[in-house]
Image (cartoon, rainbow, N blue to C red):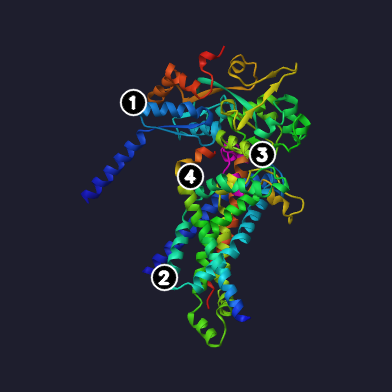
Amino acid sequence: MKNAFLFAAALALSALAACAAPLKINGSTTVNLPVAEAAEILRAEQQMDIQVDTQGGSAGGISMLGDGLVQVGMSSKPVSAEDRARYPAVQIQETHIGEDAVALIVSKDVWGGGVKALTKGQIKDIYEGRITNWKDVGGKPQRVAFFNKEPGRGTWEVFVHWVYGSPKAAPQVSFPEVGGNEETRNKVAGTRGALSQLSASWADGKKVFALGIQMDDGTIVAPTNENIATKKYPLSRPLFILTKGEPAGAAKTLIDFLLSDRGQELVKKHGYLRLKDLQ
Amino acid sequence: MTRAWSWFFSVVALATLAFLVGIFVWQSVPVWQHEGASYVTGAKWFFREKEFGALPMIYGSVVVSIVALVLAAPLGVGAAVFTAEYLPRGPRLAVKVLIELLAGVPSVVYGLLGILLLRDWIYALFAPFDLLSGDTLLTAAVLLAVMILPTIVTLSDDALRAVPAAQRRAARALGLTRAEAILHIALPQARRGLSAALLLAMGRAVGETIAVFLVVGRQDNNLPERLLSLRPLLESGQTLTSKLGSSETNIGYGDPLHWAAIVGLGLILLVLTGALTVLGASVRRTSHA
Amino acid sequence: MRKAADYLVGSITGLCALVAVGILAGLVCVVAQRGAPALSWPFFT
């Protein structure tokens, strides 16, 4: 009887210890790149126990933080009023660690066929199904294979914010969907006539190509770092680390690291803009 | 005493099942009130406009599973006939064990292989039909066919072995060739077990999420006008499971109506797979030589 | 004629078994070749 009690006590204690330890992080695949590397460094240098995941993108990061399943969320879009209203007991704090842009990427055959930029009007027409062939925008005849980002993804929200003003104003469409950045790039690279939304730093110019935006005056703005920093390129979005209230403990250590020079170098390394790069 | 205990545990099992189904029904009430019957007959799913029609997804699930069965059944039953009737004891057990091991491969692996290989193959193979992409209902169906193949082979083999050897010996004694004994004696008598095998395999196909999610394209509202045409197979689609595996479950969590719609999909899936499983189990129980 | 049918059934089912085992074993080979790290969930979602 005594042995059983000791065993149960030992089990409970170890379970408690296991629960207390790891710092759990979840959210956007875009923000994940520098954060995952920062976590690696902190694991090696400070023996911290950090688990990073990308379930559900930015929306997943917000909801898991609100539900208390993770201590830190990653988001490539600002936390909206609705999100805050869903979790009234949680005060979600955003910490800005960098900036990224959303590019419209196309497959090699479209880029090679001569389509290097689109106007907002053309993009709207494609999204609403009025343009279905690349020849209507100056390319070779090929059906437009538009892969829409899952709604809820930071990338998608930046896109509809720019085209329609808000996610609510965007019409409901029925396109094939893609999830995270990796899946998007793979699908666009492997499909003829493909178009989708992708974090600008993931458009490597080898498998997928980032279109420029043709503004009203005819100039073409490409998603280069200068254009993003000076806000000439309209589709930019902030990279946030989310915490419940003020960051504390392991979360604070991570955030301090990301805001330090070393951490910001990681942000830059993965193609995003550091805080000091922004005007 | 044991009778009392077995009654007790049977009740517990049934109560748990009833509880599970009950929760799904209860949580999905808002969408049944909102849509009524058009929840299962409506062809448009636009959650932001509060329009929830699950028919394209039911269509997707059913088509993908049926095509998977059509592809896997002849191959699987043929293979089972070979292992049950032609192989001697040793090799038969080896093949059986091998196939059953492969049945245990996690579905994620199938899905990822589907992305790596199957998608490009189908895209290239059907290029003359001007596919939009390699993510189609057919891709999902082929992937599912490979996944349910082990199930069909193992269960069909069991069904054929359940036919007593005496029957086959009698057939041979009467001068029938081996093939005739199989086709006219063994297969007809194993009919029930074979049907059970196919029903259970279809149940597995209907419930498969991850593999289908990765290759089906996840395009909503792609219900064709002519339900029995083959063209939709070459287009992207959505199944009940791929919708449930998508990010909409996360998005819908905050809104009672949207959440009810999602849970409702789960309920439909539960009923579908439950019906197939129960059918398969009851057909199996009544099978005898 | 009946003997021919006998051989036919035997070889067709044998082929089925071969193809079935081949497909499934081929899966295992591909996984072994490409290596598990390349097949990771975050890689694809």
x and y percentages locating residue A6 in the rendered image: 23, 45
Query: Mark 4–mark 1 contact, CB under 8 Å?
Result: no
Q: Nearer the viewer, mark 3 or mark 1?
A: 1
User: Disc 3 designates what residue?
Assistant: B47
Assess whether residue B241 is covered by the magenta stretch.
yes
The residues bearing labels 4 and 3 have C-alpha atoms spaced at a distance of: 39 Å
Horizontal side, residue A268 vs residue B123: left or right? left
Dot 2 amino acid type: Gly
Q: Nearer the viewer, mark 4 or mark 3?
A: 4
The residues bearing labels 3 and 1 have C-alpha atoms spaced at a distance of: 46 Å
Q: Secondary structure at mark 4?
A: helix
Q: Secondary structure at mark 1?
A: helix
Horizontal side, residue B103 vs residue B245: left or right? left
User: Disc 2 designates what residue?
Assistant: B90
Asked whether the residues under marks 3 and 2 belong to the same chain, the reply is yes
Question: Can residue B28 be seen in the rendering of this structure?
Answer: no
- Would you place residue A223 above or below residue B132 in this image? above
Magenta highlight range = B240-257
The residues bearing labels 2 and 1 have C-alpha atoms spaced at a distance of: 57 Å
Dot 3 amino acid type: Phe
Tell me the number on the disc at residue A46: 1
Label 2 chain ID: B
The residues bearing labels 3 and 2 have C-alpha atoms spaced at a distance of: 57 Å
The residues bearing labels 4 and 1 have C-alpha atoms spaced at a distance of: 34 Å
Dot 4 amino acid type: Arg
Q: Residue at x 71, y 50 (%)?
A: B232
User: Disc 4 designates what residue?
Assistant: C34
